[in-house]
């Protein structure tokens, strides 16, 4: 906590006060193609901007194409040489996720980095178009499916270029506040027991478990792709739209714990690009440093169960 409040750097040389530009300052990503979900606003936009400034080809997957186009223009205004594309992506729709992946693959582009950034938070109970609780569907299942669809392309790119591929899941410290036993496998859509806060924590726990299990599988295959999860920090963005008043009150009393957007994007950019993390996989990062998550987040049996459960949900949705 002291390090966070003071901004003193950790072992990586960076800390809570570091910005996305600072952690990528000496890195040239000209050879990289990056997909980032939710890259049109908040820390996603800042991540996209910095990656483009470091010469990566950035592809933003966004639900709101008008906002995505505005984001693209902002990035081009910051850097008129930026390579930036925007594609439609609604993570709450498995059909949309499949269409996005199919479109990208049809372009025959490489894929070096996948940043699963998009998310929703504390929303009232509702189901996705596939009949799955909305926070779990958007924050976890959509990204799980997207990663699965793009994984062969990432493997192909890593093998042909010799450049390590990286997958980054944006989780949250909120993974510690979830339902009993972590994931409500038997009651994933239960309205009576629904808690907007616990449902969010469940989806963020799922992000870590997904990253850890995928990391384990890729390591077993000997694939040159790492998978890690990050907590970006507390940042007042559109993510808080369902609890804006309460969050502003909380921020008033805890102002020293909050980051600005450039600081909020730092850990994502660090984990996605920094050469210090070559070969590091299956880890959780806070303030650009490795951090130990809650015990449930490191439960291998729970991660495997979630993996199988997620595939079953996708299979069931596709047969209805």
Image: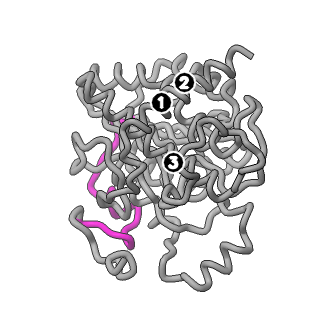
**Element at badge 2?**
helix
Task: Give the residues drawn in magenta, as a range.
Answer: 13-32
Is 318 rendered above or below residue 21? above
Image x and y of residue 35, in percent: 49, 37
- 24 part of magenta stretch: yes
Q: In which quarter of the image is the N terminus?
A: bottom left
Residue 85 in which image quadrant: top right
* Farthest bottom residue in view: 253
What residue did someone put label 3 on? 181
Q: Give the residue drawn at x 75%, y 16%.
A: 320
Which of the two labelled residues, at mark 1 and mark 3, occupies the earlier sequence position?
A: 3
**Number of numbered discs visible in the structure rendering:** 3
Q: Does the magenta stretch include residue 285?
A: no
Element carrying mark 1: helix
Is the Cβ of the residue at disc 1 closer than 8 Å to that at disc 3?
Answer: no
Residue under label 2, please give it: 311
Query: Quadrant of the rendered structure where residue 313 is?
Result: top right
137 relative to 16 in the view: left or right? right
Residue at 77% in and 32% down: 129
Labels 2 and 3 touching (C-beta < 8 A) = no
Residue 80 shows in this picture: no
Residue visible at 73% across and 42% down? 190
């Amino acid at each position: 906590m002291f390090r966070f409040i003071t901004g003193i750097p950790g072992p990586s040389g960076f800390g809570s006060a570091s910005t996305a530009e600072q952690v990528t300052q000496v890195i040239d990503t000209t050879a990289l193609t990056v997909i980032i979900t939710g890259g049109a606003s908040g820390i996603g936009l800042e991540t996209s901007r910095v990656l483009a400034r470091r010469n990566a080809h950035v592809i933003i997957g966004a639900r709101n194409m008008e906002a995505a186009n505005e984001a693209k223009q902002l990035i081009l205004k910051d850097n008129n040489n930026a390579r930036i594309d925007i594609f439609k992506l609604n993570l709450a729709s498995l059909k949309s996720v499949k269409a996005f992946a199919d479109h990208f693959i049809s372009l025959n582009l490489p894929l070096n980095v996948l940043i699963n950034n998009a998310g929703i938070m504390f929303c009232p109970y509702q189901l996705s178009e596939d009949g799955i609780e909305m926070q779990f569907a958007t924050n976890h299942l959509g990204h799980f499916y997207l990663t699965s669809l793009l994984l062969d392309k990432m493997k192909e790119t890593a093998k042909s270029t010799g450049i390590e591929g990286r997958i980054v899941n944006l989780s949250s410290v909120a993974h510690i506040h979830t339902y009993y036993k972590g994931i409500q496998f038997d009651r994933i859509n239960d309205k009576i027991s629904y808690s907007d806060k616990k449902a969010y924590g469940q989806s963020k726990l799922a992000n870590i478990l997904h990253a850890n299990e995928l990391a384990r599988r890729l390591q077993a295959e000997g694939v040159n792709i790492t998978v890690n999860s990050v907590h970006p920090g507390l940042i007042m963005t559109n993510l808080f739209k369902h609890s804006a008043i309460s969050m502003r009150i909380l921020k008033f009393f805890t102002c020293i714990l909050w980051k600005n957007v450039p600081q909020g994007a730092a850990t994502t950019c660090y984990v996605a690009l920094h050469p210090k993390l070559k070969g590091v996989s299956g880890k959780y990062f806070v303030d650009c440093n490795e951090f130990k998550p809650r015990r449930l987040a490191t439960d291998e049996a729970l991660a495997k169960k979630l993996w199988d459960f997620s595939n079953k949900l996708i299979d069931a949705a596709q047969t209805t």
